[in-house]
Amino acid sequence: MSNNKIVPPSEFIHTASYTVAISDINYGGHVGNDKVLTIMQEARMQFFQHHGYKDEVSIENNVGIIVTNAAITYKSETFYRDELVIKIAIENISKVGFDMLYVIENHTSGKITALGKTGIVCFDYEQKKIASIPTKFLQIIKQGN
């Protein structure tokens, strides 16, 4: 199987936090691979809320986002009650979308537990079609680039 290489960026535009819940733990005694996507979504929501948006569906003028693809590279185990720091960066901004990168670290050990990347496009939920990135939001995501 080919490896999706996720290169951690050097600059981040947001830092989020997450405490691992018991519902995140799988039969192996560590965070399940599916739960890492949930942790990335929580970090993304913290980013949106930090900038005054209530959710991912209504950024501006009926335009929200849709995640079109996702990749994760697992680096080390994460356990119940671990405090995580999720650093977010933005790359590959186009007229309608961008890539969001996530570096998930264990706050106590400083170890990177996972690297993630989501491809995101803006979507007009009223017209049910892909839309341009709203101007104000574009300024926010460009601040780190």
Image: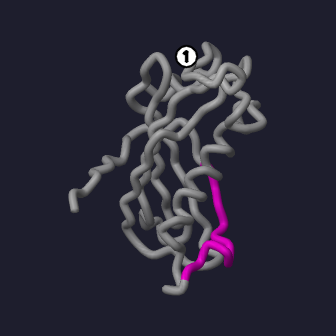
Quadrant containing the N terminus is bottom left
Q: Is residue 87 above or below residue 18?
A: above
What amino acid type should be assigned to the residue bearing mark 1? Ser
At which x and y percent is residue 98? 46, 30
Depth order, front residue of 33/46: 33
Colouring scheme applied when the structure was drawn: one colour
Residue drawn where x is 39% and y is 65% of the image = 74
At which x and y percent is residue 33? 48, 68
Residue drawn where x is 46% and y is 43% of the image = 118
Q: Quadrant of residue 9?
A: top left
Residue tagged by mark 1? 132
**Left or right of 88 in this view: 76:** left
Q: Is residue 51 above or below residue 113?
A: above
Q: Residue furthest top?
A: 135
**Left or right of 102 in this view: 58:** right
Magenta residues (range): 16-26
Provide the secondary structure element on which disc 1 rests: loop
Q: Is residue 47 above or below residue 22?
A: above
Q: Is residue 95 above or below residue 36?
A: above
Residue drawn where x is 60% and y is 26% of the image = 123
Depth order, front residue of 26/116: 26
Q: Quadrant of residue 113?
A: bottom left
